[in-house]
Amino acid sequence: MTRLRGPAAVLLVLAAGVFLAAALVPLSAEPDGYRLLWVRARQYTVTCTQLALVALSGAALLGLRTLLLRVSAFVTLAVLGLPLLLSLAQPYDAPETHRAHAPGRDDRRMVVVRGSAGIDPLWIVYVQQGEGLAERRWFVTSFNGDSQTNELVDARWTAPDRIRMTTREGRVVEATIASDGSREQVFNDRR
């Protein structure tokens, strides 16, 4: 049993590295055009970080021989791990309120997500293109509901490459979408 402690500790450290990579790589998935797989993987950041901390704790129990070293490893993991878990425990995936396919394009969808900007509601409009693992997401625009007149009440495709969004006060925002799915141009305050 003693001979297996070292290799088992090494395997647990490697597992912790894999879990940490799985937790931290999706955090870079904010820029436009990233694969939606990475954006959705952000939901599991806290779980992967917890698994990495458990694996490191197991490695410390198996690999360190003296009680003093084990206690110091646990204290270090707690001091470093708890703030990391708390900083990652933010919700990243707000609920979708609207989804519509572009006319004539089954691979392109407009998605409206409702989140919050502090105490105010926030509507974010994305274009998603592709299917499965190749699906990508681009930011189009957002509406901050700090005033009820800025509330997004309608978002629709007017052409395969154009989205029209209307606020409660009747302000119209139109966006032209490039052939790759990214936002080309946004026109504000059209009535």
Image (spheres, helix red, strand yellow):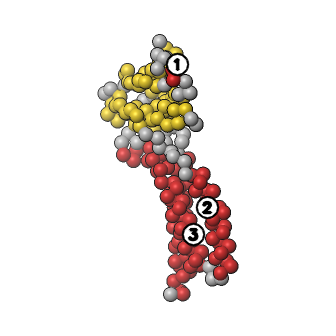
Q: Which quarter of the figure has residue 52?
A: bottom right
What label does residue 188 carry, if any? Answer: 1
Q: In terms of depth relative to the viewer, which is nearer, 73 or 188? A: 73
Q: Secondary structure at mark 2?
A: helix
**Residue at 49%, 25% in the rendered image:** 151
Q: Which three-letter amino acid code belongs to the residue tagged 1?
A: Asn
- Percent x, y for residue 10? 55, 74
N-term-proximal mark, 2 vs 3? 3
Q: Residues within 10 Å of mark 2 (few under 14, many from 20)?
A: some
**Residue at 57%, 69% in the rendered image:** 56
Residue on which the image places disc 3: 56
- Real-space CA distance between mark 2 and mark 1, rounded to the nearest whole angstrom: 45 Å
**Residue at 53%, 69% in the rendered image:** 55
Residue 61 placement, left or right of 114: right
Residue 190 placement, left or right of 161: right
- Real-space CA distance between mark 2 and mark 3, rounded to the nearest whole angstrom: 10 Å
Residue on which the image places disc 2: 81
34 vs 66: above or below: above
Q: Secondary structure at mark 3?
A: helix
- Percent x, y for residue 164? 43, 21
